[in-house]
Amino acid sequence: MGLLDFLKAPELDHPRFGRMKYKSGYWTAEVDILGARDVALRLGGTRNAIDPVAEEHWGEMERRYAELADEIADVLYNESYAPIRAAVEAGEYPGDPAEIPMLAAAEEVWDYATLVGVEVDGNLVELSYVSEWEVEHRLGVYLRDCQLDGFNGSV
């Protein structure tokens, strides 16, 4: 063991996510999850282990994601896409309106939004998406105990 080895970030081999590194209160890895590739996964914990509550809530969220997808799409559509579309239709959109996809319904969100990050802190799960209609910010959907708990249009 070297003199400064205590400064190195701890690592662990997770049976599902492979090699994970610890940084700033989270175990991190780039993983393929929920139908998306190279998602930045962050599970809360200590330098010694992943928080079992965070891991349990992530597992439940992962099992229930398919049934939550419609509700998540509704939030992304109504809270983020619809206001931008309304600005385009009113001629008030500050950018190039041709760059905004014209979606007819919430289920079309999945053709234009991609999951890029998951952060789990205890029983709170934050899902981060990039979209073709909001190119400057990531969109955050929050679930507490696998129930929709909020939205942030600028993650």
Image: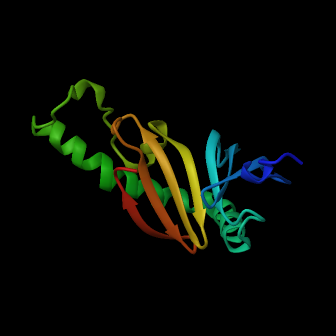
Q: How many marks?
A: 0
Find residue 9 and report its horizontal and vertical position in percent: 72, 50
Q: Quadrant of residue 67?
A: bottom right
Position above or below: 63 against 101 = below
The structure residue drawn at horizontal position 40% and vertical position 50%, both measured from the top left corner, is 155
Position above or below: 97 against 47 = above
In the orientation shown, which residue stands out farthest toward the left? Answer: 91
Find residue 149 and report its horizontal and vertical position in percent: 44, 70
In the orientation shown, which residue stands out farthest toward the right? Answer: 1
The structure residue drawn at horizontal position 66% and vertical position 69%, both measured from the top left corner, is 54
Position above or below: 37 against 143 = above
Find residue 139 and report its horizontal and vertical position in percent: 41, 49
Q: Quadrant of residue 74?
A: bottom left
Depth order, front residue of 139/99: 139
Q: Is residue 148 left or right of residue 98?
A: right
Q: Is residue 118 left or right of residue 139?
A: right
Colouring of the image? rainbow
Q: Is residue 81 left or right of residue 46?
A: left
Find residue 76 and report its horizontal and vertical position in percent: 39, 52
The structure residue drawn at horizontal position 77% and vertical position 49%, both measured from the top left corner, is 17
